[in-house]
Image (cartoon, grey):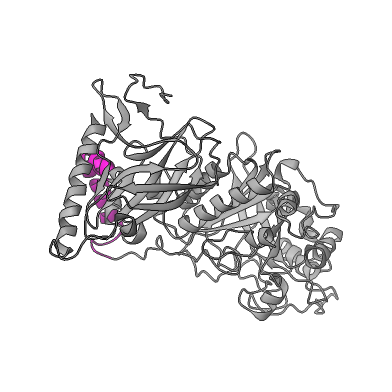
Amino acid sequence: MGAERSGTAMRPSRRGLLIAGAASGLGAVAALGIESLADSASPPGASEPLHGQETIPFYGSHQAGIATAPQAYAAYIALTLRDEVDRDSVQRLLRILTDDAARLTQGREALADTEPELAHLPARLTVTFGFGSRMAKLAGAATSEVKPLPEFGIDRLEQRWCDGDLLLHIAADDRLTVSHAQRMLLKDARSFATVKWTQAGFRRARGSEASSTTMRNLFGQIDGTSNLAPGTQEFNQLVWNKDSSTTMVLRRIRMNLETWDELDRPAREFSVGRTLDNGAPLTGALEHDEPNFRRLTVNGFAVIGDQAHIRRARSENPEERIYRRAYNYDEPTTGENISDSGLIFVSYQKSVAKQYVPLQQRLDQLDALNQWTTPIGSAVFLIPPGCQEHGFIGDTYFTA
Amino acid sequence: MKKSFGLRATALGASSLILLAGCAAPEPGAASPSPAGTTIEVKDLWLKATQDDMSSAFGTIENTGDHAVTITRVSSAVSGDTGLHETVANESGAMVMREKTGGFTIEAHGKLELAPGANHLMIMDPKKPLKAGDEVALTLEFSDESSFDFTAPVKDFAGAKESYDESSSQSGHGH
């Protein structure tokens, strides 16, 4: 078990030996189980592509988990700092959480990790930290961008999904890895903060389709075609601040699958202005074709309607663009209600006020999709720059 | 019973490591030993947070030198009462901790694992609360009178509730 592991995790430890001893009786049973699975799934010896050991660097000028190709699973956890937490204790908290994240993302157990084996398959784990306004103030960071969004007419916000002092954004291609990292970080945050809300999101599993594929949401739509692409010059210009920080908007958007069910396929496509099968604009053939907003039907109506989401989301001003990195949510239900589903909309941009807000105001005024979607949660965070080894997330604010 | 078996198994595991390491070591007497304090590396050391009761340090101490070293004492400005502790089963089968007589010897190129429920560095009655995220300075002293200074972070930890040897109670701290 743990004893064969290479690198820093190698440790023929007391714990490892204890487990090895205790498990010897179970080994035969486990081996049988694995064998019978292998028999039915693939010929013996066939090699499976495994992704569990893949890592995303933690240290760097930017925090990981933003320009990173989205992992299959994400957890967003907003913490409320305890009343007594001050600048000194916030720094202690950030040091601990940074150390946990630095280890876990590289497949190493955190210090005091009681389930080290769960840390050994990082599966592209990233942990990204965001500061709400109280946290930003304590750290001494600029807070002008970190405030609640203006009210929108379509909002039906529930406080249980709003705001927060410190955001932990944990993501990996393995759900168990996310759970373990979440538990470890929350155990270490517990004496400083309580949990305000947790939002679990998912996309298609790793390996189901090419990782560059635009995600689908639970309406079945290809969601996020027109997006800034990480690594491009426009991404760098519109997302990263000079100090390598950025801002994040998180909106929990309930999607009413019941009323969406009443809509026929042409009406569904018309509401967005794209086809459902490949996401092409209604005036095009392929997903990334430029929409032609001027094209008319034989009857003289716009092919992409005035209320179509893609028409309303687009700005004449190229500065008013964001980088979106959304996840689906689908909560357990009971009784007559069979769906509690939606989108964890996440966007990154230099300026919330100049980039996100104008876009959302246009959608607030008019967007056919508003009939089936309702924002129920909203939060804005400063995403501090990344850090170097021996540093901690947010350290530049504390040393300034 | 399982626990005491585990401890014995670990002792065997450790000695086999030492044998392996021995193969690579130069012939004895080739050079005078470097001071123990210069061949020691601590890895992933951390302390359990406490208000005013007691704390322990866990992690790995490695001896990179060609000669065995013996840790005889741990000291820290945060406490006047520190010790090297091991955890053993008492007559009633309960796991209890007690002072490690003769200190911890780490063979050449060997390592010492300090873990909850096993060997650890003990910090009694700290002068101030050890809070999560604090860095605590510790000094290891060796039988050759050399020493090694390092700092370790404090973490909240629910485990490591060993009882003292003197106490037959199994209900947590023997303080």
Q: Is A170 rendered above or below residue B99?
A: below
**Camera-side residue of B76 and A93:** B76
Q: Residue at x 58, y 63 (%)?
A: A65
**Camera-side residue of B126 and A80:** B126
The tally of labels here is: 0
Magenta highlight: main SS: helix
**Residue A366: which quarter of the image?**
bottom right
**Residue B159: which quarter of the image?**
top left
Relative horizontal placement of residue A295, taking residue B62 as reference (left or right): right
Q: Is A285 rendered above or below residue A99?
A: below
Image x and y of residue A132, in percent = 72, 52
Asked whether A22 falls inside the magenta stretch, the response is: yes
Q: Residue furthest front?
A: B145
Numbered range of the magenta stretch: A17-46
Image x and y of residue B39, in percent = 31, 59
Image x and y of residue A83, in percent = 71, 38
Q: Is A344 rendered above or below residue A197?
A: below
Q: Residue at x 43, y 24 (%)?
A: B175
Q: Residue at x 32, y 28 (%)?
A: B96
**Residue A310: which quarter of the image?**
bottom right
Image x and y of residue B126, in percent = 50, 35
Residue A76 seen in the figure? no
Residue A273 seen in the figure? yes
Asked whether B110 falls inside the magenta stretch, the response is: no
Q: Quadrant of the C terminus of chain A?
A: bottom right
**Camera-side residue of A367 and B84:** B84
